[in-house]
Image (cartoon, helix red, strand yellow):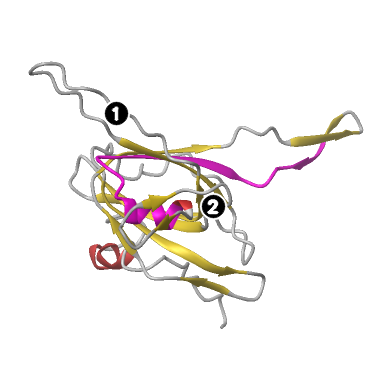
C-alpha cells in the first residue's frame, strides 16, 4: 500500500547575500585527465545570476506517442557584477596582457581561457548556499564610465558575462550545496571554496 502522507518538506529559506567569489583556471580537461590551477579570490562581488539555456529538447514521436527525447548539452549563462574588475583579473580571465609598465593590452588574438567559478550566498536562516560552475569562459567585459554631476556620484560597476558548459572529462557542469542539509555540514561548507569541489559518491551496497 502506498503511503498517503506526504514527506516532510526540506527546510526553506531565501538567499539574501553574495560573497567569496573565487576562480580557478581549468588547465586540462580531457577524457583521461582533469586538472585545475591555483584559486584566485575576486573581491567586491555584488550580484551573480545563473541562467540555464533555453534550447528545446528533440522529441521523437512513434506509435502516436512521445517515444524518445534527446536533450542538448547544457549551456549556462553566468553573469557576475563586481564593484570593480582589477586589471590583473582581467588579464587572467580575458587572456589579455599586462606589459612591464603595468598597462593592460588587449589584442585581437586574445582568447579567454576556461575557469571554474565558485561563490556562496547567505540565506535568511544565516546558513549559506554554495555554488561551483566547473567550466566557464568569459565574454569581453562591459565597461561604463560617467561624470560626476555636482554632489551626485553615480557608481560604475564591472560586469562579466560567462558561458558555462559541461566538462569533457565527466560531463559535469555545476555543483550546488546548502549548508546544514543533505549531510552537507558546516565543516564541509568551510572547505567547499578552498578547492574546486569534486563529487564524493557513496559506495554501492556490497562494496
Give the residue at the far top of this rendering.
Answer: 150
Left or right? Give the position of 66 relative to 51: right
Residue 149, image x, y percentages: 15, 16
Q: Which of 79 and 73 is in front in this view?
A: 79
Q: Which of these two is toward me, 25 or 87?
A: 87
Q: What element carries label 1?
A: loop
- Whether residue 177 is visible: no
At horizontal 62% and vertical 59% (from top left) the residue drawn is 171
| Image quadrant where residue 49 sits | top left
At x 33%, y 62%, the residue is 40
For residue 205, say whether it is visible: yes
Queried whether the magenta region covers residue 76, the answer comes back as yes
Side of 201 where 197 appears, left or right: left
Task: Point out the image quarter for the C terminus.
Answer: bottom right
Q: Which residue lies furthest to the bottom in this view?
A: 207
Camera-side residue: 140 or 180?
Answer: 140
Residue 107 locus on image (x, y percent): 52, 49
Q: Is residue 92 magenta?
A: yes
Q: Which of 91 and 131 is in front in this view?
A: 91
- Vertical placement of residue 77 versus 64, above or below: below
Label 2: state its secondary structure: loop
Residue corresponding to mark 1: 145
Pointer 2: what residue? Answer: 110
User: Which residue range is magenta in the image?
Assistant: 67-93
Question: What residue appears at the point 28 percent right and 36 percent down from the top-left corner?
Answer: 14
Label 2: how many Cα within 10 Å (few below 14, some 14–19, many 20+): few
Residue 98, quarter of picture = bottom left
Res 81 quadrant in image: top left
**At which x and y percent is residue 123?**
24, 43
In the rendered image, residue 46, in percent from the top left (x then y), is placed at 26, 39
Amino acid at each position: 500500500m502506498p503511503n498517503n502522507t506526504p514527506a516532510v518538506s526540506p527546510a526553506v529559506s531565501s538567499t539574501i547575500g553574495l560573497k567569496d567569489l573565487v576562480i580557478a583556471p581549468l588547465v586540462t580537461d580531457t577524457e583521461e585527465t582533469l586538472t585545475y590551477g591555483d584559486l584566485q579570490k575576486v573581491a567586491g562581488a555584488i550580484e551573480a545570476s545563473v541562467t540555464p539555456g533555453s534550447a528545446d529538447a528533440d522529441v521523437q514521436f512513434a506509435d502516436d506517442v512521445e517515444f524518445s527525447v534527446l536533450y542538448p548539452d547544457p549551456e549556462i549563462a553566468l553573469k557576475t557584477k563586481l564593484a570593480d574588475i582589477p586589471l590583473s583579473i582581467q588579464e587572467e580571465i580575458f587572456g589579455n596582457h599586462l606589459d612591464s609598465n603595468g598597462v593592460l593590452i588587449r589584442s585581437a588574438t586574445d582568447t579567454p581561457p576556461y575557469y571554474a567559478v565558485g561563490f556562496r550566498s547567505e540565506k535568511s536562516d544565516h546558513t549559506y548556499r554554495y555554488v561551483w560552475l566547473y567550466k566557464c569562459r568569459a565574454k569581453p567585459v562591459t565597461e561604463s564610465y560617467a561624470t560626476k554631476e555636482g554632489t551626485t556620484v553615480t557608481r560604475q560597476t564591472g560586469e562579466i558575462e560567462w558561458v558555462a558548459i559541461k566538462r569533457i572529462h565527466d560531463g559535469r557542469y555545476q555543483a550546488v550545496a546548502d549548508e546544514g542539509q543533505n549531510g552537507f555540514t558546516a565543516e564541509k561548507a568551510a572547505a567547499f571554496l578552498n578547492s574546486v569541489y569534486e563529487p564524493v559518491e557513496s559506495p554501492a551496497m556490497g562494496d
